[in-house]
Amino acid sequence: MKNLVLTPGPVPVPRFVMLEMAKPIIHHRTEEFEEIFYTTTEGLKRIFQTKEEVLILASSGTGAMEAAVSNTLSKGDKALVINSGKFGERWLKICKAFGVEAIEISVEWGHAVDPIEVEKSLSENKDIKAILIQASETSTGVKHPIKEIAAMTRERDDVILIVDGISAVAVFPIEFDNWGIDILIGGSQKAFMLPPGLAFLVLSKKAWEFSKKSNLPKFYFDLEVALKNNLKKTSPWTPAITLVIGLNAVLNYFNDIGLDELYRKHSIMSEATREGFRSIGLEPFAFNNPSTALSAIMSPNNIDAGTIVKKLREQYGIIVAGGQDQAKGKIFRITHMGDVNKGDILVVIDAVENILEDIGFEFEKGLAVRTATEIFK
Ligand SMILES: Cc1ncc(COP(=O)(O)O)c(C=O)c1O
């Protein structure tokens, strides 16, 4: 059976990108590839909204999260971690692995952090060196107030703001330079519509200053080495050539449609999905500030969301993500990133309606699809 992958990473890859990546391999130490590499990093600057160099790592997103910490902090430094889900937890684990002392703001899953809490923690702990946060917490479908938090850190010379934007960059506006973010991270298998394998990150001048003082171990992810090579249109190690070529095609496409159109696509899909399900009584898990990267939808009280995920896969060939840890069995998650169109959204809503009807949930059949359709119109 043909599968329709609608998970918030990996996401469907458009055909024109797959065809680009299907061409015979070229060598990376050639003018041809260096031109592609250069065009790609220039294109990334537009997406990250920065004049700084954007680095491309051959790793999944976590590699760039690790690099952000290991290149800017030192053993025993304090970092403020905003933990509101699986990926906030990952910051805690990275800090632990590198001997960075984490001060945690634990946020109830499904909620965004209150910037007042962040300000309070910063003033109570004057020796905090970095704030580690997600722009979009993919495990809960919540967006954090990055602009407001950046306004706090840009005033302080001794604190940097490190933002995991893996499910945020190219999804909704994040202005790296204008807002004064210090590190912003993206990942290929999300809004960049590529297979997994590339991570991107950009550092502010302040973050590069921090990197000079950092004493944590690094080799493959030594960002100063990556920067030197970036300026020479290349990377220190063998790059993921095929993925970079695919990325170049994606960035050309983004350039053609414009960033606003890209953001608008995610936002319309997200509104249609949320309001569609809400019309039949299925609420979004995001209590406030939903991310437009994905919709995390709560299953009705007495229905295990895992059953919906399983039946979607087995009966319809539709792959969505379930909830993790404390959200397991409570939510199912649908991507708005990648090569996903309105038809895909209507198909998954219709399939969920059918499954709910089979299970015996009482609702007005067809209302969710009609509501989403109206929003699309
Ligand atoms: C917000 C966020 N951070 C980090 C990651 C981890 O990235 P990866 O699995 O590519 O290492 C993901 C992946 O789903 C994510 O969505």
Image (tube, rainbow, N blue to C red):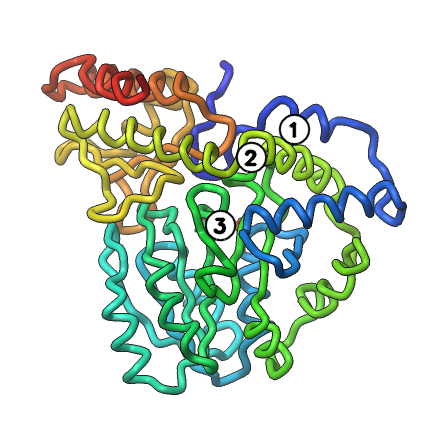
Q: Residue at x 61, y 58 (%)?
A: 51
Local secondary structure at mark 3:
loop
**Image vertical order of residue 266 relative to residue 199, above or below:** above
Badge 3 is on which residue?
166
Q: From this viewpoint, is residue 355 visible?
A: no
For marks 2 and 1, the one nearer the N-term is 1
For marks 2 and 3, the one nearer the N-term is 3
Of 271 and 2, the residue lying toward us: 271
CA distance for labels 3 and 1: 20 Å
Q: From this viewpoint, is residue 318 visible?
A: yes
Q: Give amino acid for label 1.
A: Val
CA distance for labels 2 and 3: 12 Å
Badge 2 is on which residue?
193
Q: Give amino acid for label 2.
A: Met
Badge 1 is on which residue?
17
Q: Position of residue 227 (x, y in %)?
A: 71, 64
Q: Give amino acid for label 3.
A: Ile
User: How would you rate the neighbour count of disc 2 (Cα within 10 Å): few for under 14, some for 14-19, many for 20 or more?
Assistant: many
Mark 1 and mark 2 in contact (Cβ < 8 Å)?
yes
Q: Residue furthest front?
A: 178
Point out which mark residue 296 bears: none
Q: Residue at x 44, y 61 (%)?
A: 179
Label 3 C-beta lies within 8 Å of the nearest ligand 1 atom: yes
